[in-house]
Amino acid sequence: MGNLMKKLTNWIPLLILQIAASGAFTYFVIQSGLIPTKYIAALIAGEVVLAVAMFFLMKPSKKIGRHAAESSVKTMIGKIISLILSLCLCFGSSVASKGGSTISKITNGVLKQTTYSVYVLKKSNINKVKDLNDMIVGSVPTITPESFMTASTKLNEEVNYKQIKYKKLSKMANSLIQNKIHAVLVNEDYVSSLEKSEPTWDSATKKIWSYTVTDDDESSKIDVTKTPFTMYICGVDGEVNGVRHDITVKSRADVNMVITVNPKTHQILMTSIPRDYFVTIHGIGEKDKLTHAALLGTPTSAATIEDFMGIKINFYSRVGFKMCEKLVDAIGGIRVYSDKAFTPWTNRKVFIKKGWQTMNGKQALAFARERKTYGEGDRHRAANQQTVIKAIIEKVVTPSGLANYDKVLDAIAGTFQTSITSKQLKDLINMQLDEMPKWTFQSSVLLDGEGIMTTGGYFDPNSRLYYMLPNEESVKKNAKYINDMMAGKTVTVEKDSTLETQIGDHDSSSSSSNSSSSSSSNSSSSSSSSSSSSTRSSSSSRTNRSTTRRSTTTRRRSTTSSTRSSTGSTRSTTGSTRTATTRSSTRSSTRSSSGTTSGSSSSTSSAKKSSSSTRSTTQE
């Protein structure tokens, strides 16, 4: 045993172990692709210096007497340090290896693949694709034309068939069920739509062929460190009947946000889109809530936004709500401002106080999901979501955030999936580590609309539901912000005065460009917000999604505006300010009277128009 211990503590094996551990660590760091080249060079140099230092520290000297004893102590200290270094390097290798594998998992291309399948009637004699020779196959090629052409060509290589093209999936499904065609070639993302249009689809049909197309996306060639790009954030709950599922399970999108990034100017624009927007679903050709588009897959949601906004979305990410909670805890919490104190409806076990505070994961998630507390409802919730995302980004790119690298990776594993490539994501991380740029933020929740209660949505046509008719001017304005930024311009978003708080409004140290208002204006807004907060809170609890929602919102905004004017008049010390305030109050009162009279009729009229439009679409 003594000889064995002597061999194990021999300085030469320990030095060899340290050198091997250093080599392994360097290898995994290079393989991960997460560290800039200049840091790798410094890492290798540091490892060489440590190896040389340990060599001279551990190597026994030939001194005798008192000097020999001192040499023995020095050697033992060197062995201990070398062993500790080896253990640390082994742990670092594990973390570096995990980093590379995690990046690969979240960018594994799942969202960039499209599976096409051939369905036939169960009662038919068609059991394999060869049986379709010279038979009729229906399809809707306009949904995803590029991937459809690839799948169609592949099918044609295996069998000669006759193709009939349809404009709508429902008509194609009906033709198969009625035995007017022999088969259909359909994108698997839209099979649920076939099941909806034909209730007997699942029991009446069978799948005989499938082919997965890996899309040749031009976005994968973008240099994200030099070229502006857009990313659609699709936030999903993934919970059905109290059971939380993996993010790969298709569910409604409760968060719809387009993030535009300009890596040259280091500007980030966040544009939130109402989940209830009544828009034409891509590939279906009929209208429903934007949130329901995600039931057909994240690419469908992104394509739907591209269609009605007239923008190009380069990448999309599917984010589970659980990621927000886990990520915030992993980085040690985030500092967020709340304009009021409340107990969130989504989690009654946490409390959000008024003012600046450091939120943990549960608080941040509840804050980002809260709607009922606010008079502005979903629009204020969108502003909170942007606030949380901004705080997370700012924390992650700090030295303390980067120090929690392994915890961040654990937090996003299994709760985040994106179409951006591994190389592009690693390039962004390298740029941040190499340059440590300071990002500025612009936020927009200006996408507005008219709320109505009506029937006719594609997924649930017979139920009377709440929808929001898009405000075309708002859509055009926000599309221009995005397109201008994609063109390399620096944008300044018009501030939404109807919201009680926006990103950067209360943070004097914020890098947001939105905080360019004068300090006196901010002070006045802050004090008036306080006096009207209770009015909004009590009113919001009684607000329901009815046809009069618009007029209620109009009266609330007018009342708040009048209160602010009154407050400003009381606190003003100059005659000119009193005059300006009096005029503002007069205009506000006039708007209030007008809004109260016309709000209800406007909403009712819009509901009728929407209902008429819906019936027209259905008949078509």
Image (spheres, grey):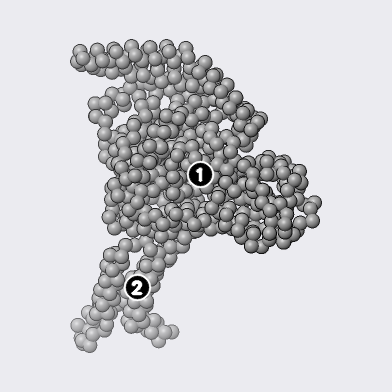
What amino acid is at disc 2? Ser
- The residue singled out by tag 2 in the image is 22
From the viewer's side, name the closer residue of 51 and 300. Answer: 300
From the viewer's side, name the closer residue of 489 and 348. Answer: 489
Give the crowd class for mark 2: few <14, some 14-19, many >=20 residues within 10 Å: many
For image coordinates 47% across by 54% down, the residue present is: 217
Q: Label 2: state its secondary structure.
A: helix
Image x and y of residue 308, in percent: 49, 37
Q: Label 1: state its secondary structure.
A: helix
Determine the image quadrant of residue 491: top left
Residue 592 visible in the current orientation: yes
For image coordinates 39% across by 33% down, the residue present is: 477
Image x and y of residue 279, in percent: 53, 35
For image coordinates 39% across by 24% down, the residue present is: 533
Q: Quadrant of the C terminus?
A: top right
Residue 356 visible in the current orientation: no
**What number is the disc on residue 303?**
1
From the viewer's side, name the closer residue of 328 and 303. Answer: 303
Camera-near label (2 vs 1) is 1
For image coordinates 45% across by 30% down, the residue present is: 472
Give the crowd class for mark 1: few <14, some 14-19, many >=20 residues within 10 Å: many
Residue 198 is left or right of residue 549, and the answer is right
**What number is the disc on residue 131?**
none
What amino acid is at disc 1? Ala
> How far, Cα to Cα, is label 2 from label 1?
47 Å
Image x and y of residue 509, in percent: 26, 39
Q: In which quarter of the image is the N terminus?
A: bottom left
